């Protein structure tokens, strides 16, 4: 029996009890405008053709699936296969939804695309997409992050984005979100706010998922063609959840495929504030305009979070993941900083692939699980990005 997941979310943006639009009325209007435009524009042949051509000729899709034979042999159990999103232009899966969002903004005749960025990955991918489609791009970034993430800051400037330093408060991601949002509210009719994962008010969790779902559609077809059957497991790291839902969507109806999301356990899930395992340790709540699992502190405020991978440290998570956890269709596991660092080094040295620290969480889970399974079992891992950005940090940390 196959389950039909197509109607998700409902017309109000709900995945079961999660999602929705927890925003003031005037903002709800702006979100509804985007939802309406999204439904219309994405049906248009000229939009679909332009997006498809750019995915092929610009991003370099389809990304290959690589059988990590040496790693699998060393582990002595299941076969590990990698969906190579690290080979995309700009080096990660984020270009998939940034391209979709920038193109949508252009088709909606918006004058400016606005976003915040933490470590700068979303900012660089969005600045790239905006340069390509020819639309102004404004990135808000905390002053503390600007000083830490120099290469990404330089890249955004080279790509022509306007960088707005945010100096208030702690001057990191949270303040950048507030600042970017205030700018957006000045003219929601002409500006487009580009969210960086499957989070926020409807329609963003649906839109970002749809733009990312190409990952799983390709992977399912590639795997079937190469092996004559589907993988037994499909695994991905979960921050907000965009690369994971991008992989999972095509497999939701395949009951034989076990889906695994891997959250960052940081320094340990028993240490509040020192991990970001939202689905594993959190509770249903509200954050950033949606209902979802949230990590809250005793005062009911979003808790501090930590992960060795800055792209995963978010105290909320996509509403569809929250739903998939509750119905048991996806199993959510964790990997800590130490295992993740091991996986980063092992994949680099055994296969010559330097993974992003975010993606290394999913690799760590696969490395831990493969030896417990037979040699005929196949694990497909979404390698969401490459580790060039992490190389200096890891080398310093390990004294290389
Ligand atoms: C940003 C990022 C992630 C985390 O975001 P999701 O929305 O959970 O996918 C994972 N991997 C890489 C390489 C990233 O840059």
Image: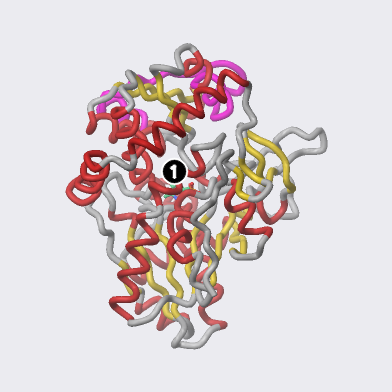
Q: Which residues are magenta?
A: 152-180
Q: In this view of the protein, which residue sits in the foreground, 387 or 5?
A: 5
Is residue 290 visible from the viewing direction of this image? yes
Image position, residue 40 (x, y; %)? 36, 36
At 48% from the left and 11% from the top, the residue drawn is 186
Q: Give the farthest residue toward the left.
A: 57
Q: Give the farthest residue toward the right.
A: 298
Circle 1 SS class? helix
At 53% from the left and 16% from the top, the residue drawn is 182
At 36% from the left and 74% from the top, the residue drawn is 68
| Magenta-span inclusion, residue 242 | no
| Magenta-span inclusion, residue 178 | yes
Question: Left or right: 84 with respect to 239?
Answer: left
Question: Left or right: 120 with respect to 14?
Answer: left
Q: For the C terminus, which image quadrant? A: bottom left
Image position, residue 160 (x, y; %)? 26, 24
On screen, residue 187 above or below 326:
above
On screen, residue 50 above or below 172:
below
Colouring chosen for the image of the structure: secondary structure
At 57% from the left and 16% from the top, the residue drawn is 168
Q: Quadrant of residue 81?
A: bottom left
Dot 1 beta carbon under 8 Å from ligand 1: yes
How crowded pointer 1 is (Cα within 10 Å; few <14, some 14-19, many 20+) is rated as: many
Q: Which residue is mark 1?
A: 208
């Amino acid at each position: 029996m196959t389950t039909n997941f197509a109607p998700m979310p409902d017309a109000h943006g709900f995945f079961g009890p999660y999602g929705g639009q927890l925003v003031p009325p005037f903002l709800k209007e702006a979100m509804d405008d985007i939802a309406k435009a999204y439904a219309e524009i994405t049906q248009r042949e000229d939009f679909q053709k332009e997006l498809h051509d750019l995915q092929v000729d610009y991003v370099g899709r389809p990304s290959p699936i690589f059988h990590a034979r040496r790693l699998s042999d060393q582990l002595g159990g299941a076969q590990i296969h990698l969906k190579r999103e690290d080979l995309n232009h700009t080096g990660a899966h984020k270009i998939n939804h940034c391209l979709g969002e920038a193109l949508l903004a252009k088709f909606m005749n918006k004058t400016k695309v606005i976003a915040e960025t933490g470590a700068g990955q979303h900012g660089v991918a969005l600045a790239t997409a905006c340069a390509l489609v020819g639309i102004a791009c404004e990135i808000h970034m905390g002053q503390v992050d600007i000083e830490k993430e120099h290469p990404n800051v330089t890249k955004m400037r080279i790509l022509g984005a306007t960088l707005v330093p945010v100096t208030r408060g702690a001057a990191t991601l949270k303040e950048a979100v507030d600042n970017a949002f205030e700018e957006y509210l000045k003219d929601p009719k002409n500006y487009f706010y580009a969210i960086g994962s499957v989070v926020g008010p409807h329609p963003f969790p649906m839109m970002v998922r749809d733009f990312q779902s190409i990952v799983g559609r390709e992977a399912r077809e590639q795997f079937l063609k190469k092996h004559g059957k589907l993988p037994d497991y499909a695994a991905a790291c979960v921050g907000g959840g965009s690369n994971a839902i991008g992989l999972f969507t095509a497999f939701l109806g395949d009951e034989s495929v076990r889906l695994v999301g891997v959250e960052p356990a940081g320094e340990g899930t028993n240490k509040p504030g020192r991990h970001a395992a939202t689905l594993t340790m959190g509770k249903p709540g509200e954050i950033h305009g949606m209902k979802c699992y949230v990590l809250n502190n005793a005062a009911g405020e979003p808790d501090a979070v930590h992960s060795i991978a800055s792209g995963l440290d978010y105290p909320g998570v996509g509403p569809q993941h929250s739903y998939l956890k509750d119905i048991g269709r996806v199993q959510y596991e964790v990997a800590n900083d130490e295992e993740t660092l091991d996986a980063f080094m092992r994949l680099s040295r055994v296969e010559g692939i330097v993974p992003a620290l975010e993606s290394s969480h999913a690799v760590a889970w696969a490395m831990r699980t493969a030896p417990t399974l037979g040699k005929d079992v196949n694990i497909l891992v979404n390698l969401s990005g490459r580790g060039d950005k992490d190389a200096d940090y890891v080398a310093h940390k390990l004294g290389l």
